[in-house]
Image (cartoon, grey):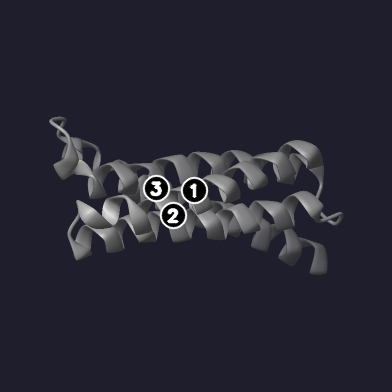
Amino acid sequence: MNNKITATAAFFGMTAIILGAFGAHALKKVLTIDQLATFETGVKFQMYHALFLLFVGLNSQLADKIKKIILNLTTTGIIFFSGSIYLLATDSLNTLNFKVIGFVTPIGGLLLISSWGVLMWNFLKKKA
């Protein structure tokens, strides 16, 4: 389980760096400042949660069951939250209307919050 989580963290971290560089260089020429800021929000949250997964994967105090729950919540949350933000920020660059998936962003945010909640609950439960 730890290798899977750590590899997932590395993947999300690597792609966050790639997307951040892509946004800073290639997209800078074709998006507005607001669109770039939105895209950057997606990159930041992806990187924050890549580091979160790295912490979870390397933490020996967490049971595999808890790690799996956190991995699933965080992975789905990143895809929904950051993925929808990437599509919404670059909506003006294609003929598809990604505004219809805007409802996915808060669902992704809720999943990310839930993953942190599972971590918090796990540690609070151990202290008690």
Q: Is residue 123 above or below residue 111?
A: below
Which residue corresponds to the image point at 20% horizontal and 63% vertical from the top-left? 34
Would residue 61 appear left or right of 83 to someone viewing this image? right
| Visible residue check, residue 111 | yes
Disc nearer the start of the sequence (1/3): 1
Which residue corresponds to the image point at 79% horizontal and 39% vertical from the top-left? 3
Indicate the amino acid at tag 3.
Phe
> Residue beneath label 1, please?
18
Instruction: Report the quarter where the N terminus lies.
Output: top right
Q: Which mark is residue 83?
A: none
Which residue corresponds to the image point at 32% horizontal and 55% vertical from the top-left? 39
Q: Are marks 1 and 3 in contact (CB under 8 Å)?
A: no
Circle nearer the viewer, 1 or 3: 1
Q: CA distance from mark 2 to mark 1?
A: 5 Å
Out of 36 and 110, give the one closest to the viewer: 36
> Residue beneath label 2, please?
21
The 10 Å Cα crowd at callout 2, few under 14, some 14 to 19, many 20 or more, is: some
